[in-house]
Image: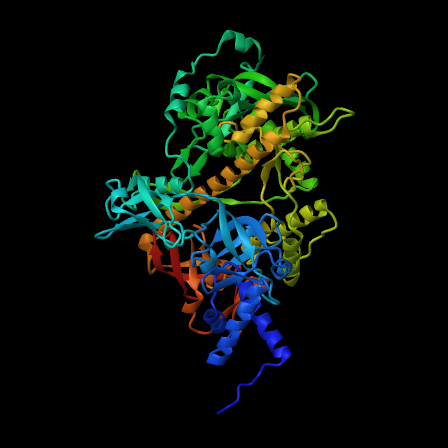
Amino acid sequence: MTKKKKLSGDQKKTLINNILQTYLLNPHSGLNYKQVSKRLGIEDRARKDLVRLLIEELYRSQELVESKRGKYQINPEGERYKKSAKTHMTGKVDMKQSGKAYVIPDEKTGDIFISAANTNHALHGDYVRVSLFPIRKGRKREGEIVEVIKRNKTQFVGILEIAKNFAFVIPDTSSMPMDIFIPRENLNKARSGQKVIATITEWPEHSQNPFGKINHILGQPGDNQVEMQSILAEFDFPLSFGDKSEKEANRIPAGIPEKEIKSRKDFRDTFTITVDPADAKDFDDAISLKKLKNSHWEVGVHIADVSYYVKPGMAIDQEAYERGTSIYLVDRVIPMLPERLSNQLCSLQPQTDRLCFSALFELDENGKIYKEWFGKTIIHSDRRFAYEEVQAIIETGRGEFADEIRVLNTIATALRNERFRKGSINFETQEVRFKLDKDGKPLSIYLREMKESNKLIEDFMLLANRRVAEKIGKKRGDRPVKTFIYRVHDTPSPDKLDAFVDFLKKLGYKMNLSSNKTLAQSFNRLFHDIQGTGTENMIETIAIRTMAKALYSTHNIGHYGLAFPYYTHFTSPIRRYPDLMVHRILQDYLNGAPSVKQEVYEPMCDHASEMERKAIEAERTSVKYKQTEYMLDKVGEEFDGLISGVSKWGIFVEIVGTKCEGMVPLRDLEDDFYYLDEENFQVIGQRYGYQYQLGDKVRIRVKRIDLGKKQMDFTLVS
C-alpha cells in the first residue's frame, strides 16, 4: 500500500492559483470540479478530490459563487476578479464567416477577440457589451459578449430551403454565419429555392439558430431585378417610396409663383449649362458665365433648390433623411427623393425655368476671387451637355459654346493648380462601368477615367463647397462662429502612415512628413513618379488604405485630402441629405437667424455618414455581382492580372482592363508552402523563397465562378 503524497504549501498555492485562473478565463461559465480538473490536465482520482476540496474552500472564502448545484463561477464582486482586468467594454461586432468575431470598442483601444463559442447570439454590426478575460502574456485581448445592446439588423436576404417539417434561409452575406430557422407556418407562401427577405423574430437561449419569418418574396436567384433588389434589401434600403411621400410629391404644383420669381436674382438671360454623364436624369448643378465690364468673369454655381419644395415635417423630408443618399447600382439609380422631384421639378433641365440656391463669384482667368454672393436664384439652362461632348470641345476648340467652355476650363484649371500647390492630394481613380443588354446581363466592362471635362465641373463644385463653409465657419472679428455641417477628412493614422513610409523606403521612394502640406506634395510626386511602373497599382492601393474616411460633422477639423480648412457639401441636395440641411441652415443664417443647436445636428451627421457608407457598400456589391456574372462563361480562359491583395488564405488578383477580382488559394500553389509576410504585402515560399507581392503582374486561369457568393477562383498560369 502506497502512502498518499501530501502537497507542500507552495504546491497547494500554485494549484489554487491555477483553479482561480481557470474560473477567471471562463467568468460566465459554471464549472464543476471535474471540468476544472480536465482543463488543468488532472486525471488521477486523488488530485481530482483535492481540486473539489479546494473549490469548496474558495467558495467558503467567497472567491467563487455557486451558479448551479455543484457548479461554480468566479465571484464578479471579488477583488481578484476586479484586479484582473477592466471587466466590461462596449463596442461594435465585426463577425467573420467562421463564426468568430472581433469587437471594436468605443475606447479605440484595440480589437477584442471573441471565439465562436462566446458570441452569445450577437451578429455582425451589433452594438454589444463585452466581458473581458484577464490578459495573458503574449496573447491578444479576448472576451465574451454578455449583452446585445442594439441589433444592427434583423432582416436578411437569402435563399429558402424547405424540408419536410421545417425550413431554413441561407443568408447571402458571409458576415451572417448561421442560417435562419423558419417554422412552416411562417413561410408566407414562399417556395424552396426562392430568394426571400427573412426577419428574425426570436432567438431562444439554447438554440444555435435564430427563428424567423418570411416577410417578402423577391423571386428566382439569378434574375437581374431580383438580385438588384436583394442588394438593396441586404443593406436595409427600402425597395419603394412610402405612399405618403408619393402623394405629397404628386401634389406639388409644377408652376413657379410670380411672387417667388421676384424674390430671387434672375439668371434666365445669362449663359448657363449643365454637364453630366450621358445617362443622367437628375441634374442638380449648373454653371453660368458672364463677361464683366472690368474684364473679369462672373461664374455662377447654381444648385437645385430642393429646400423650396421639401420642408421639415413633410413625409418626403423624413424619408429622405432616413435614406440619407441616392444609391447608384450598376443598372439603376435609387433616388433619395421621389421621381417627380429628383427627375422633374428639381432637375435643372434645359430650356426650363428652375429654382436654385447659387454661389456667385467674380474671378479673373487665373482663378483669383474678387467678390462672392450666396442666395436664391432662378435660371434657364441653355444646353444640357454630356461630359464626352465637353471633352471633345476642350480637345478640339470647336463646337457649340466653345468660347464659353474654353474660359470655364481655363479658370477651373487655375483653381485646380492652386489647390494642388496648397497641398491637395491628386487621387486619380477609375470607375468600373458596364454595357448591359435589355435584361441587365453584362456584355462588356470598361473603365471610366476622370478627364478635363469632369475636372472642370468638379473644381467649380469644390469652389462653391469651400467658400460656403468659409462663409459660415471662418471666424471674423468678435462674431461667434455658428454651428454648421462640414465634410471633414482627418489626417492619416500615424501608425498606418509610418508603415506606408517604411514600405516605400524599401522600394526607393521617400516621403516628407514635416507638415501636412509637404506630405500631400510627397503623395502627388509619388503618384507622378510611379505612373506606368509595375508598382503603380500596389502603391496607389496601399496609399488609399492609409487614408482616413471622410465624414459629416458639426466639429470642423478641415479636409486633409483637399487641403481645405473649411469644406462642406452644398452642391447635390437632390441626392445627398446633408446638402439639403446645409441649404436650410445657410439660408437661415443669411436671414440673420441664431445658431442652430450642435447637439441636434451632430447625430444627424452621424446618420448621414453611416447611410453614405452603406450606399457605397451596396454600390460595390452590385459591381462585384455584375463582374462575377460577366465572368460566368469564361471558366478555363486566361487573363493578365495584377495582385491586388494578399492574405493567409490566398492571393487576390485583379484582371487588367475589367478589375474583376478573384482569389488564388495558397493551397493551390503546389510548388512550395507559402506563408504571409503581412508587413511587406507579400506571400513567400518557405523552401525556395519565391515571392508574390501586391502589384505584381501575373497570368491567371479562371477556375470556378460562384455567382451566389459573388466569388471567383483563379489559378496561376505564370
> Does residue 217 appear left or right of residue 415 in this picture?
left
Residue drawn where x is 68% and y is 50% of the image: 522
Q: What is the x, y in percent for residue 674?
A: 49, 70
Is there any visible trace of residue 301 in the rendered image?
no
Residue 485: x %, y % from top left: 61, 31
Q: Is residue 532 left or right of residue 211?
A: right
Left or right of 265? Residue 280 is: left
Outermost residue to the bottom: 1
Task: From the viewer's side, name the closer residue of 526 and 495.
Answer: 495
The percent coordinates of residue 606 (x first, y second) are: 56, 37
Judge by depth and name the residue closer to the eye, 660 or 12.
Answer: 12
Q: Is residue 681 above or below residue 578?
A: below
| Extreme residue toward the left, this view | 164
Say which quarter of the image contains residue 604: top right
Rendered view: 650 above or below 358: below
Snapshot colouring: rainbow
